[in-house]
Amino acid sequence: MGKKESLEDTAKVLGRMYDGIEYRGFAHSVVDDLAKFSGVPVWNGLTDDDHPTQVLADFLTAYEHLGKDFSEMKLAYVGDGRNNVANALMIGAAKVGMNYAVATPSSLNPAAELVDECRKWATENGSEILITADPFEAVKGADIIYTDIWCSMGEEDKIAERIELLKPYQVTKQLLESTGKNTIFEHCLPSFHDLNTSTAQMVYEKFGLKEMEVTDEVFRSPASVVFDEAENRMHTIKAVMVATLSDTLKF
Ligand code: NVA
């Protein structure tokens, strides 16, 4: 998009043809421009900076498993602390008053402006945001441990440096058991927890790593609710569509 036709014009064309647009891509400005110019509801299905619809499914899944208010939950994210999913979780947690801790190397800290904005929302909603380099500090008392892949879409060439940085942030049984609680494990997927993908095979051959952001043991453990999250993507996006289309489609 934006190559032979401006994004503004494409947005207007799509708006004439569709009742809503879900955008999944890279630059966040694209989803903003589609929303600005198309005249129809636009849903962010994933950009470089944000993944809000994923978080709806994650929070619904946490609610189903933990059975308590978001204001009584703590979510600890361990890994690449400034990727789209980590940003979205921090925003979501701040908005619902959930405590949020992120364990990440300082070079992958979330952007300071975003943290400031989220801290304002969190304070209004009675929760806190902790940013630390220590995974064991972050997960203390956590109800949910969350991780995501170490190289997001478009960052595949950074694999060597990310392995170096993030190896100490792998979610292991020891980390999961250190919370002092019956903690659930969440992941947005896809996940490199075994060698059953060609990417994981390549990483194993080049770097000797059999698992990346989470061990296979944790991924397949009873604490893991990752496929409930996957199913809840469907239910939550339908809810968002109903909420945002009901005015224009009159139902
Ligand atoms: N951070 C990941 C999320 C995938 C759902 C990525 O951008 O690839």
Image (cartoon, rainbow, N blue to C red):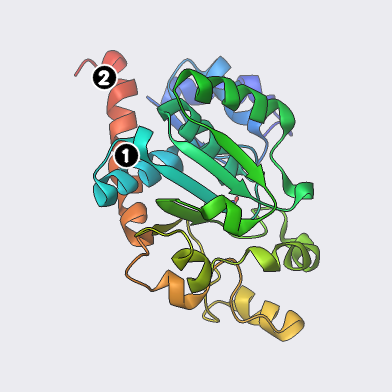
Q: Which mark is residue 236?
A: 1
Give the left or right position of residue 108, taking residue 46 as reference: right
Q: Position of residue 210 (x, y in %)?
A: 61, 82
Q: Give the amino acid type for the residue marked by disc 2 in the picture.
A: Ser
Callouts 2 and 1 close, C-beta under 8 Å:
no
Front: mark 2 or 1: 1
Q: Is residue 51 visible?
A: no
Towards the viewer: 59 or 128: 128
Where is residue 121? Give x, y as percent: 52, 21
Q: Is residue 89 above or below residue 144?
A: above
Q: Is residue 29 above or below residue 211?
A: above
- State which quadrant residue 166 falls in: bottom right
Residue 11, position in %: x, y?
Answer: 56, 23
Residue at 63% across, 73% down? 199
The residue drawn where x is 67% and y is 80% is: 209
Q: Earlier in the sequence, mark 2 or mark 1?
A: 1
Is the residue 241 above or below the residue 76 in the image?
above
Q: Quadrant of the N terminus?
A: top right
Disc 2 to disc 1, C-alpha distance: 15 Å
For mark 2, what is the residue?
246
* Quadrant housing residue 4: top right
Query: In the rendered image, which quarter is residue 160 located in?
Result: bottom right
* Amino acid type of the residue tagged 1 in the rendering: Thr
Q: Residue at x 66, y 53 (%)?
A: 80
* Callout 2 crowding tier (Cα within 10 Å): few <14, some 14–19, many ≥20: few
On the question of residue 161 being in view, the answer is yes
